[in-house]
Structures are given as C-alpha cells and as structure tokens.
Image (cartoon, grey):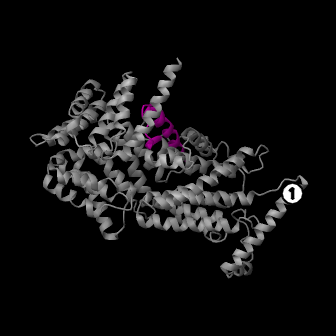
Amino acid sequence: MSERLSTDANSKASVTSTAADVGNIHSGVEKAVHMMWNNQYDEALEKLRAKKDKNPRYALEWANVSLVKTLMTSTNEDRETLLDLFKAADSLSTSTKYNDPMFSDEEGDDGDEEEEEEEEQKTRKQLKKEKKRNKKAFKARKKDATKDGDYFDQTWKLECDVIYADALLIRSIGQLMMNSYIKGGINLRKAWGCYHNLIQQVERDTENRIPYELKMCIKYGTGTFYAFLALVPANLMKLLSIIGFISDRDLGEQYLIEVFESNTIRSPFAALVLCTLYLFLPTGLGDVEVSLSRARHVLETMNARYPTNTYFHGYANFYFRKKGEVESALSSITRAAENAERVGLVPLLIKYLYADTLFMDQQWFEAREQYRKILEHLAQTNEKFAYTGQVVLSMAACYVMQDKEKEALIWFKKVGSMYNPKSKNDSNSPRFANRVIANPRLLPLSGVYMLYINRDLAHMNKEQGSRVLAELKRVTEGKDLSGPEAENMYNLFAGVIEKGSGNIDAAFVYMNKILENEKKIPQDSMILPFTYYETAEMEYRRGNVDKAKELFDKGSKIKGDGNETLSNRYSIAMKQLRRATMDRGAR
C-alpha cells in the first residue's frame, strides 16, 4: 500500500458520475456547500449571508458551515452556539413551509428591498396569523387538486420538512453529547418521526415527482439516523427501542452510499458518516479489513475532491492507525492541521489526535509536548474542550513512560478539577484517575492503559507490539504490582498485545491467569469485562462458538469501568454470534 491515500482521477470520477441527474432546486447553495468542505468558510458564509434570515435552506447551510468549522474544536462554547443556529433554521422552516416556494439560483434576484424591510418589521403575532392563513390556503388548494384528480406539487413543504428534521437531528445529537439526555431524547424522537414520514413519501413516489436532490437529502437524514443509532451505547439503544426506534445499520449504510455517490449537497456529510461507521463502529467478530477497504474508497474520493479539507485527512489518520501505519497516520493528521491553520483556525481536536498518534508511536516526550500545548491554549482561552480530562490523563501517562512517576501522580490529581463534566467523551477520565490515586500500584500501567482505551493497542503490527510489550516490562520492572487489580491489569494488557501480534497461545496464558483469579478482582474494575470480551473473541476465531457464547454472555453482565464503551462491542459481537449459530444450525 502506498503511504498516502491515492488522489487519482478515478476516485474523483466516482462522485461526479451522476452529476447530470442532479436537480437544480439547491443550486443557490451548492457552491457554499463545496466551499465549506474545502476549508473556505468565509467564502461560503458570504454566499449564504443575504438569504440566511429569510430562506430556511440558506439558514440550515449557514448553520452547517459553523458545524463543519467547529467540529475540529469540540468545545462546549461551540456546541452551545451550534444549538442556537440549528434552532433558528428549524424555526424558519416551520414558519415558511406554507409560503410560496423559495427555490432560487445563486445569481437570482434577492427581491424587492422595500418588501423585505416590511417583512422584517412584522410582529410575532402578525407572522403567526399569516402562517395560519397560508396553511389554510395550502390545504384548500391540496383538497381541490385531490378532488379534481390533479397532481398537487408540495415540493416546498417537503423541503421545509427535511430542513426541520435535519436541524432537529443535529440539535439532538449535540444535546446528547453534552449529557442533556432528556432534551436530546425528546428531539431525537421528533426527528425520527419526521424521517420516518419523509422516507415513506419517497418510497411511495413511483412517478418520481420528488426532485432527485431532495430525495438524497431525505435518504441522507434517514441513513444518518440509522447510523447514529448503531453507534449509541447499547444501554441507551434498549431505551430507544422501547419508544419505537429501530437500528438498521445495513439500510442506513445503503442510503448513505447512494447519497455519497450522488454528488448532491449532502454527499460530503454522507461520506463523513460512512467514515464514522467504517472506522469507529466496532467490527466485533467480522473482518476489519472489509470496513477499512470501504473507508479507504470514501477517503480517497473526498480528499481528491476537497484537497484542502481537514476532516477527511483527519479521518485518514484513524484509517492508518488501524492499519498500524504510524508514519502515514502522522502525515495525514499533519496535513489536516495545516489545512485548518492556513485559514486561521486552531484545530484542537486535530492537535489532540496528532499527540495521540505520537503516543501510539511511543514518542513519549514529543507527545507530552503536544498535550502540554493544548492545555496551555485552554488555560489562555478558558474554552471547555470535550476531551480535556483525556488530555490530562495522557500527560500523566507520558510522565509514567518517562519514569517520572512523581510528576505523573500530580497530573492524575488534576483530572478531577480539569475534566469536562458536560462532555460525554470525557466521562470516564475522573474514574480511572481516582482508581490510580486510590491504588498507586496501577500507576506504572497507565501508559499502556491509554493505548488500550484509544484502541491503538489492538491495531499495532508485530514490531510495534514487541516494542510496547518491552516498554510495559521496562516501566513495571521492580515495581510493586501485588494485589489482584494491578497484577491482572498487567496480564490483560500483555495478553492483548500478544493477541494483536498473532501470538494466540501466549495471549491465552495471560487471559487464563486472570480468569483463575476472577473472584479476587474488583467487580467495578475494567479488567473482567474486557478480559471476557478478548478471550471470547479468540475462542470464536478458534472455532469454539459455544465457549465464545458462554464468555460473551458472562462478560456482558459485568458492569466494570469502561462498560459503556465496551457494551457496543459486546452487543455487536453477540448479534454476529447468534447469526453464526443460526447459520450453523441451518447447515
């Protein structure tokens, strides 16, 4: 494989092949959409500015510019601002959906200035009365058309319904990510109702009355919804299932691929969601190379189309890390950061990923310096980064790997006051820090712990695995690892390293040591649930399906630290196991 993802013409052609089929109802915002994904944020905003307060489509894309721009910062402040912007878009879509259609091309007339000024001066009461009158007239026209057997064109209303659903979905995800579960859950439920209704209209449209580009927007939203449900923790999915949600990853992926290949205004977002599915949704008992191959195709296509983008180069970093190709991972994340900084942004998330990649490559000093720069920036700006606690833990881990345990312990004690309580991404940080503070025997293991929870430990090649195992032995040599938690955490990490290196017999030796001491290990520790998962996966790949099922069943019931993250892996693996068992029975 080449070091860089290919950016040849063939990749680009795959997303432009259907351009001739695309309708023109969104021609006014198309350029702005492409600009935002190529880090041309100011230019995109300028194209949307004139109509963002009147036209809901422009309002939504205005909000999307900020979404794309601020995803790389991941601060509380940016997330709060986004909630307001998407609220403005969904409110505008509701208030104008019974108006005359506002489809227009980019160079079209902005309308009479006196008329616009008059609109702006209307009171809330007048607007509400006007909306009611427009809705009544709309229904009357629809009734007359139905009575006469004529087709009634309600494309504009459908457009507004799509905009409302899109804005509501983003708001709900933002609220859930900020631990606002009640508001987020209510809005997620509303969004699901909208998409369910919209996709049914698409399925009934046998005469292709709905414009192609609008269909792609509906399929993007529905596909994203299904994909999001596939990514939520299993315990939350159980709750969502009770109130009517359905997680259908395969159908969601099918819709998203169709949108990605359509070259419509939602193609880039569809590509981003697909990359999230392929790179972050656990493969469980499946073949990770299949998912990585699909991710590569999307990344090559989008990096060819948007050469100065940040996100797809950033996602390429995860792709290469999962391949164990650290040099290429560093190259990709460096390019992502440079593209963002070139337009004046401080991409905190990208810088954090750069530091994590250095950490994966066991460049402890260099990684520590990058983490330090992030924390210094946050101290100067008072921004609340979504991963601050993780950065502090990583700082401590670097000191551990440099044999500076005194300094490391100081940083562990800072986690409780520095982590982000409003961020779901940071919720586990203080738990592990408190465990280390309460049991300093865990301190020498914390460096490899960070590699494990970042999933880098599982994706190291044989040479990297040998290096990190040697490092683990070095930092623990002569240290007191007595006691069931420290001793067996060492066994877990050593076993995972051997497993990733293909030394399955050696991995089983470590895992069996843990299981033999199960009754002595604290139930609230991460050790047992992770050990059962890793061992069950190895048993399955050895063909011991019944033993794997027994281990998965038992491990999934243990609620140790990190269980929220691990629950998805258990859920996916157990579904795959049930399917394999059924197939075996059928044969």
The picture places residue 37, in percent across and down from the top left corner, at 53, 55
Q: Toward which corner of the image does residue 459 lie, by quadrant? A: top left
SS assignment at label 1: helix
Q: Residue furthest right?
A: 148
**Residue at the limit of the structure toward the top, as seen here:** 587
Q: Please indicate whether residue 369 sits to the left or right of residue 195 in the image.
A: left
The quarter of the picture where residue 417 lies is: bottom left
Q: Position of residue 36 (x, y in %)?
A: 54, 59
Residue at image mark 1: 145
492 is higher (above) or lower (below) than 409? above
Q: Is residue 187 left or right of residue 378?
A: right
Residue 503, compared with residue 283, is above or below; it is above
- Which corner quadrant of the image does residue 479 belong to? top left
Circle 1 Cα neighbour tier, 10 Å, few/some/many (<14 / 14–19 / ≥20): some
- Considering depth in this image, is 299 or 232 the residue closer to the camera? 232
Give the percent coordinates (x, y) of residue 404: 14, 52
* Residue located 31% across and 39% down the image: 529
For the record, the magenta segment spans 278-304
Residue 52 picture location, percent across and down: 62, 69
Horizontal relation, residue 214 to residue 133: left or right:
left
Whether residue 43 appears in this view of the structure is: no
Q: Is residue 294 visible?
A: yes
What residue type is disc 1 on?
Ala
